[in-house]
Image (cartoon, rainbow, N blue to C red):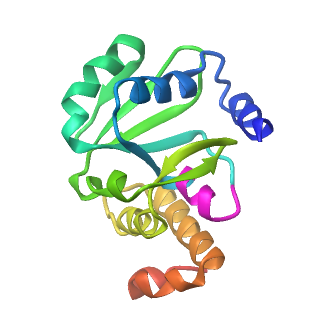
Amino acid sequence: MVQALAFWKAVTVDDSNLLERFFELLRVHNVRFCLIGGQAVNAYAEPVVSLDLDVVIASARVADVEPLLRKQFDVERFEHSLNVSAAGSDLRIQIQLDQRYGQFPDRAREGRVLGIDLPVAAVEDVLQGKVWAAQDPARRGSKRQKDLADIARLIEAQPQLRPLVPSDVLARLV
């Protein structure tokens, strides 16, 4: 499975080892976290390539973690996220700050993503996050279309999830 990580690092041109350094920082400081978004969908459905990595950290630790991140990485703060990047990498890590995601790390499980074992939000939580994103009118249309595709991937791989998807979202699936 190292091949998956090597492929992703090549696609993201991650010469700075941003991915490994980011996870190491969280682990060294005992910060509970989990993957959400497209990479989390990849843990439950047929994987697709993405340059993004979406993460939720335990909400009680956000104030502690932000200064630690700023010591090692470039960090931009937005209303609902911290965006983490580094020179020498096209990888984009987004830490979700929306409180609706706050309990996701508590329900996370270990999953194999990018060839490494990482905490991944429970499949129901991954789906819920995608539904929230698909229903967000402030989100770019192209992003909402990708969210719909991710929802479709999840319910194709795990049909028992279909009843959890609101009818207005199901109606928009191809």
**Left or right of residue 152: residue 124:** left
Residue 76 spot, x, y in % from top left: 33, 26
Q: Residue at x 60, y 15 (%)?
A: 16
State the count of labels.
0
Q: Residue at x 26, y 53 (%)?
A: 102
Residue 173 or residue 119, whichever sits in front: 119
**Left or right of residue 121: residue 8:** right
Question: In terms of image quadrants, where is residue 78?
Answer: top left
Question: In terms of image quadrants, where is residue 75?
Answer: top left
Q: Residue at x 59, y 27 (%)?
A: 90
Residue 106 spot, x, y in % from top left: 33, 54
- Quadrant housing the C terminus: bottom right
Magenta portion: prevailing SS class: helix
Q: Is residue 62 visible?
A: yes
Q: Is residue 24 magenta?
A: no
The vertical placement of 164 against 39, above or below, is below
Residue 152 or residue 163, whichever sits in front: 163
- Quadrant housing the N terminus: top right
Q: Is residue 171 visible?
A: no
Q: Which residues are magenta?
A: 39-47
**Left or right of residue 162: residue 95:** left
The vertical placement of 160 against 13, above or below, is below
Q: Residue at x 23, y 43 (%)?
A: 59
Farthest-out residue, right: 3
Residue 38 spot, x, y in % from top left: 55, 54
Q: Is residue 41 magenta?
A: yes
Residue 82 spot, x, y in % from top left: 32, 34
